[in-house]
Image (cartoon, rainbow, N blue to C red):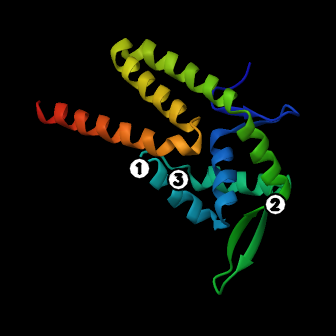
Amino acid sequence: MRGILKFTTRNGHARSLITLYVLHSLHCEPKTGYDLLREIEDVTKGEWVPSKGTLYPMLRHLAEEGLIVPQETGARSKTIYKLTENGENILAEIKKSRHQASENLQLLRNIHSEIFGEELTSLAEKMWGIRECVRDLPPEKKKAAADVLERCLIDLRKLEEEQ
């Protein structure tokens, strides 16, 4: 059985969603553990932040695996973590398995639907469908898609004002 929030590489090594996010974030640029905590807080709009007791052992484990490399810099000797080539390869491999992420999200949607009912899930399902559709559009069609979504947003705001 696989975990809903786990992503598996070809060699069968499961990675948590938070580990995948850390790899992704370090792919964008090297960061300190503190930077990662603040970024996750921003991405989750303050709703969830891993504890230091979760993040720092994870960073140490990723370094032991050779996926990231710690570098000390600055007067305060802050440790900055950088993604290694091996880390880049693992991240790319997991991103290629996008279907696994979609399957995992569907499982979470099923649980959500069971708890909260179909009406809310139906709206959430439509939002995810839109997201998937837009993401898969060729670049030359993304501007047209943005225009369609902008008109939709305007209409939704009108509905909100009618309340």
- In the picture of the structure, the residue carrying the numbered disc 2 is 84
Q: Write down the quadrant of residue 140 in the picture.
A: top right
Measured as percent of width and height from the top left, residue 9 is found at: 81, 35
Measured as percent of width and height from the top left, residue 10 is found at: 85, 33
Left or right: 133, with 150 as reference point: right
Number of on-image labels: 3
Check whether the beta carbons of the residues at disc 2 and disc 3 lie within 8 A of each other. no
Which label belongs to residue 149?
none
**What type is the residue that disc 1 sits on?**
Lys
Measured as percent of width and height from the top left, residue 77 is found at: 68, 80
Quarter of the image that includes the C terminus: top left
Secondary structure, mark 2, is loop
Secondary structure, mark 3, is helix
**What type is the residue that disc 2 sits on?**
Thr
Which label belongs to residue 45?
1
Q: Nearer the viewer, mark 2 or mark 3?
A: 2
Is residue 126 depicted above or below 91 in this figure? above
Q: Nearer the viewer, residue 121 or 66?
A: 121
CA distance separating discs 1 and 3:
8 Å
Which label belongs to residue 40?
3
Residue at (57%, 45%) from the top-left corner?
Answer: 139
Q: Nearer the viewer, residue 13 or 126?
A: 126
Secondary structure, mark 1, is loop
